[in-house]
Image (tube, rainbow, N blue to C red):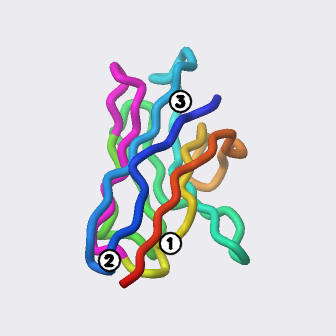
């Protein structure tokens, strides 16, 4: 499943961004989704997980309390609201089909770049 991510940009520490990913693939409402991020030297890491119906969510400890994931199955879209951003949140953010918070397909999209810097 390929997603198209958007919403990234340059923001100062403490700022907010709202990322969005969408897909044209069928069956979107049947699978869970992960937001992951890719950084040089750290590879690919899960940021947040949402179940197929949106009832279950989870977050990496590093973003808990600052990021919020949601989805709209009618629009085939997953949103990641990122608040209180820190420089260590700088990364390329991608969506991918997921099986559980730590098991997911390799992302196929381009991702969206987030830069947190003063």
Q: Which residue does the image show at 63% across and 63% down from the upper left?
A: 38
- Examine the image and state in which quarter residue 66 appears: bottom left
Any mark on residue 90, and which?
Answer: 1
Nearer the viewer's eye, disc 1 or disc 2?
2
**In terms of depth relative to the viewer, which is nearer, 78 or 18?**
18
**For the residue carrying disc 2, how many other residues have a C-alpha within 10 Å: few (<14), some (14-19), or many (20+)?**
some
Residue 109 sits above or below residue 57 on the image: above
Q: Check disc 2 and report its element: helix, strand or loop.
A: loop
* Among numbered discs 1 and 3, the one appearing first in the sequence: 3
Q: What stretch of residues is rendered in magenta? A: 71-85
Left or right: 98, with 105 as reference point: left
Is residue 48 shown above or below 78? below
Secondary element type, mark 3: loop
Q: CA distance from mark 3 to mark 2?
A: 34 Å
Instruction: Write down the residue under mark 3.
Output: 31
SS assignment at label 1: loop
Q: Looking at this rendering, what residue extends furthest in the bottom direction?
A: 118
Residue 99, numbered label: none
Left or right: residue 74 versus residue 42 is: left
Q: Residue at x 28, y 74 (%)?
A: 84
Quadrant for the C terminus, please: bottom left
Q: Earlier in the sequence, mark 1 or mark 2?
A: 2
Q: Which residue is mark 2?
A: 12
Residue 8 placement, left or right of 67: right
Q: Nearer the viewer, mark 3 or mark 2?
A: 2
Magenta includes 84?
yes
Mark 1 closeness class: few <14, some 14–19, many ≥20 residues within 10 Å: some
Q: Position of residue 4 (x, y in %)?
A: 53, 36
Residue 23 coordinates in the image, percent (x, y): 51, 27
Q: CA distance from mark 1 to mark 3?
A: 27 Å
The mark closer to the camera, 1 or 3, is: 1
């Amino acid at each position: 499943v390929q997603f198209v991510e958007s919403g990234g940009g340059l923001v100062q520490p403490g700022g907010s961004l709202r990322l969005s990913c969408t897909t044209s693939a069928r069956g979107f409402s049947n699978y869970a989704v992960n937001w992951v991020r890719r950084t040089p030297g750290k590879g690919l890491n899960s940021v947040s997980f949402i179940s197929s119906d949106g009832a279950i969510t989870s977050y990496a400890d590093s973003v808990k309390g600052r990021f919020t994931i949601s989805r709209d199955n009618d629009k085939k879209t997953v949103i990641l609201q990122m608040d209180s951003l820190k420089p260590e949140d700088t990364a390329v953010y991608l969506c991918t089909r997921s099986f559980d918070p730590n098991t997911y397909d390799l992302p196929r999209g381009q991702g969206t770049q987030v830069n947190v810097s003063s």
